[in-house]
Amino acid sequence: MNPFIEIITQPDNIAIVIMIIMVSFFMAWAFQQAFENDRRLAAGLPVEGENDNFVDTFKPLVRIELIIALVVMVGLTIWSIAIDAPLEEIANPTITPNPAKAPWYFLGLQELLVYFDPWLAGVVLPSLIVVGLLAIPYIDINPKGNGYYTFAERKYAIIIFSFGFFVLWLLLIVIGVFFRGPGWLWYWPWQEWDHARVVFEPTKDLTSVIGIDSRSIPGIIIGGIVVVSYLVGGMVAPYLYWKKNNPELLKQLGMVRYITITFLFVTMMSIPIKMILRLVFLVKYVWIIPWFGGINF
Amino acid sequence: MKRLPEITDKVKKNLIWKSIFRRDYRNTIRDRAQAVFGNVFLHLHPVQVRESAVKLRFTWGMGGITFFAFIILVITGVVLMFYYHPSVDQAYTDIKDLEFQVPYGVILRNLHRWGAHFMVIVVMIHMFRVFMTGSYKAPRQFNWGIGVFLLVLTFLLSFTGYLTPWDQLGFWAITVGTNMGAATPFLGYQGPFSEFLHITPYNDIRFALLGGAQVGGNALLRSYIWHCVAIPLVSIILMFVHFWRVRKDGGISKPQK
């Protein structure tokens, strides 16, 4: 069978196909309503739902809840009749499957392991995702766009969130599910999985590109300068820019919010940067600290 | 058929019926309100809601669908527990029994597994909707935070359930997942700084998660208890808070300009 068909028809992966369809549909619906409201706002009209009347809970709301519940129940029942949950061989610690994959919703994080060491990819970055999500209501001080779909009134918030959700979370999951085979090597959907395949990718560290051993003292210092200046530079640059062009915004944000926003943003953007470094330039580490049990960036 | 009104009358004038339904339903404003606040399940709702709450366009019903998926999972999960022993010797054969011996056992297990996948999907879409409508903004900041914890708990519920069939899929998924615990800075034996705290494979976070240095019987028991008791309890408490705060923060969010 075509390996692509084989992968997407694996019982557990059907959930991901359903997810892709549902997420695409609701993404389109959200943005369609956002642009519709933007047109109304531009024309000075009220946004949808602004002049809502009240209706009884019993029965209009109760009725629609019941209908949705029935639809969901019927859908899940059909899914359960049509497709059986997988059950593999009994657990055996001596036989390691290749690839050994985490549950699908964690495959984005597992994909991060290609680009970051486990303490970052598996512990620090997931924690920062949770912290970042919790922080959203407190760092987004834009009072507009509260309670209705809009894009024009909160462009940056929506762009950043969408990048995180659709690219860094969902796209990495899709890559982990459909494009990673034995040895966590990249397989195109039309390629057959080959367990004997060995790819010799001579990855290097950033400083070895310019001929300095990344584990030597000069290499460590240069790597440190690069990482620290990325972090500090990324956090200071917007300050300088806004101070000149939009000092009012800085005043409204305040120092704590400013630091939180820029730190989370710089950390988030380090993921695509590290991915490009690794995939395009075959750079594995930017900064190696060989002490304390090894802290590598 | 002439006697049908007589029969309904008899049923409704009956002492038992009257003890259950205190009053007749006459489709008056008062009775429609009474139907909501006189019912323990419906009184989660206000008596009246804004039109947007009834239209699918705005909320997509995603929060409610997530809750409904949770209910399906609780019900199928409880039934599954009748057929399951969380021990290395029996877990796998119990699942095989579900497949070949228990009437409708296959559909029962399928419903639980696909329901779990479904819940993970819809809870993410729910979060996306709340973000896109800006519904986390004042006065709903705190409830967004509760929602973030519920999202994490949904992932953990699904993750802990992965091991229970005790097959290769679950075993290695949990091995891969909990290996991350070993990489925790300070508290995992492979993580940075752990040497200062004398952390070994036998006293680190991963050991605490698994009840051992590798996935075994203790890990199966632990994941079972987390999955069936501990995380659902915490989730239910947070759901109470989540739903309560939706009401207290003014119901489904409305345009505030």
Image: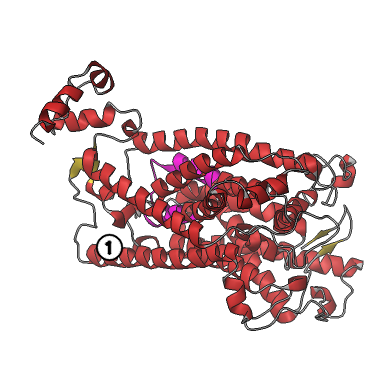
The part of the image, by quadrant, that contains residue A207 is bottom right
Kind of residue at badge 1: Asn
User: In front: A157, or A249?
Assistant: A157
Residue A137 relative to residue A184: left or right: left
Question: Magenta region: which residues?
Answer: B124-151
User: In front: B64, or A262?
Assistant: B64
* Residue B46 drawn at (x, y percent): 28, 35
Residue A151 visible in the snapshot: no
- Quadrant the C terminus of chain A occupies: bottom right
Establish if B47 lies above or below A31.
Answer: above
Establish if B9 lies above or below B139.
Answer: above
Residue B136 relative to residue B166: left or right: left
Establish if B202 lies above or below A6.
Answer: above
Question: Is most of the magenta stretch helix, strand or loop?
Answer: helix
Residue A168 visible in the snapshot: yes
Chain at numbered mark 1: A
Establish if A57 lies above or below A79.
Answer: above
Indicate yes or no whether the magenta region holds residue A224. Answer: no
* Colour mapping used in the image: secondary structure
| Residue that appears at 78% across and 43% down | B89
The part of the image, by quadrant, that contains residue B22 is top left
* Residue B101 drawn at (x, y percent): 62, 48
| Residue that appears at 53% across and 62% down | A83
- Quadrant the N terminus of chain A occupies: bottom right
Indicate yes or no whether the magenta region holds residue B135. Answer: yes
Of all residues, the one furthest to the top in this rendering is: B15
Residue A93 relative to residue B37: left or right: right
Q: Mark 1 points at which residue?
A: A37
Q: What crowding class fits label 1: few (fewer than 14 Cα within 10 Å), some (14-19), or many (20 or more)?
A: many
* Residue A238 drawn at (x, y percent): 55, 63
